[in-house]
Amino acid sequence: MNSKSPWLKRILILLALGMIAYILFETDFRLIWTHIRGVSFPIMLLLLILQLVTQFSLNLQWYKLCKTLNLKTSFLRLLVINSFGMVADAITPGEKVGGEVTRVIQLNRMLNYTTSQSTSLVTIQKSISLFALIMLNIAAIITLADEISFFNSIATRTVLTIVLIALAVFFLSLLFFTEKLNGHVQKLPSRGKLAQWIKNWMNGFTNDTKQISSQPKKWVAQLLLSFGIWALFPIKLFILVSQYTTMNLFVLFAITFVSYFAAMIPLLPGGLGTFESTMSGMLLVYGLTLEEAVAISLIFRFITFWFVVLFSTLTIILWKLFACKRENLHEIQHEIQ
């Protein structure tokens, strides 16, 4: 299996590069630029504001989760930590890998959490977020049965639904039925520091998940917040596409998250090119010209990714400058004393 994986990855990279090359050779870039410039300033401003709402809502989710787990926290420091994670996502292949490791490291440094606390927090937040995403995708498959030809087959819909339900049950079990899993882990033979660390982490993780399950109202609030955050993405695409044509919001929901899943495959840094080519290809099916589809995918990618990277970089720079000034003030006060 391992010997085949590099070949599979190479094939996927070639396919991704092939889609990108096709778009590059078949599009009129002057026309793409015309379509991009055709989006009015008020619409662009609205999309940027909605993206900032998305970022602050995500940060609020982290903040509320820290409070639920009785961890000392800071909304501003969490914003900086998530900014570090976002920048790491942009420079590592695929999404949500390097960024999570970076978040764990920064949680240790900036909020003085233990590695166990940091990994538990990241695992719980991702489990809640992915559970919400999976449930929305199940709803999309059911709703889009007559809208997208790929879902017309009963067998296809059934298989996809079963797989998604299995994933949803897995993440739900990870949050609320951790004791049984921990029981099995604790029975495993301990050999070396890593095995012991895993056992200790599982004990801590089990205690953390108990705190969530014992507060159902806060769990519901976290889940609803995740639904709201994910829902903002197709809404932004709907606003953008409405400048060119009229499309079903649920169709755009499917297009949005299929594109994100494609970008999560670790082929190119930050899913570069894979996201744009996937979204462009799916938009073409619904009557948009190639230039319109590429323009929409580029604008959407800028709003939801590159703008966030710029915002995150600016946040980190401002934080560093503030930290340096604060250190200098402490030094001056110390010298005066």
Image (spheres, rainbow, N blue to C red):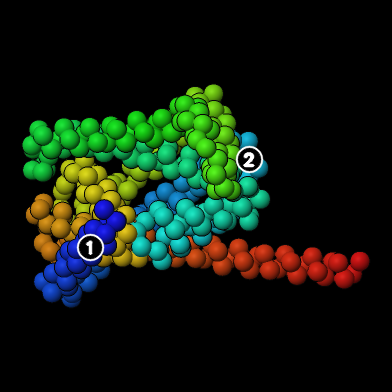
x and y percent of residue 187 in the render? Answer: 51, 31
Q: Secondary structure at mark 2?
A: loop
Q: Position of residue 165 (x, y in %)?
A: 28, 32
The percent coordinates of residue 88 (x first, y second) are 45, 62
Q: For the point 84% across and 66% down, which residue is it?
A: 333
Of residue 100 and residue 62, the one placed in the foreground of this image is: 100
Secondary structure of the residue carrying tag 1 is helix
Q: Position of residue 52 (x, y in %)?
A: 44, 53
Q: Residue furthest right?
A: 337
Give the residue at mark 2: 71
From the image, tell me which residue sits under label 1. 7
In depth, the one of 278 and 44 nearer the eye is 278
How crowded pointer 2 is (Cα within 10 Å; few <14, some 14-19, many 20+) is rated as: some
Q: Give above or below for 34 relative to 168.
A: below
Inspect this view and state whether residue 136 appears. Answer: no
Task: Please indicate whether residue 73 sits to the left or right of residue 286 in the image.
Answer: right
Write down the quadrant of residue 243 in the picture: bottom left
Q: Earlier in the sequence, mark 1 or mark 2?
A: 1
Going by the image, does 12 lie left or right of 171? left
Residue drawn where x is 11% and y is 71% of the image? 26
Can residue 84 be spotted in the picture?
Answer: yes
Tell me if residue 280 comes above or below residue 229 in the rendering: below
Q: Residues within 10 Å of mark 1 (few under 14, many from 20)?
A: few
The residues tagged by marks 1 and 2 sit, at their Cα atoms, a distance apart of 44 Å
Residue closest to the eye, 146 or 96: 96
Count the marks: how many?
2
Q: Amino acid at mark 1?
A: Trp
Q: Note whether 137 is above or below 271 in the view shown.
A: above
Q: Residue at x 20, y 37 (%)?
A: 160
Residue type at mark 2 is: Leu
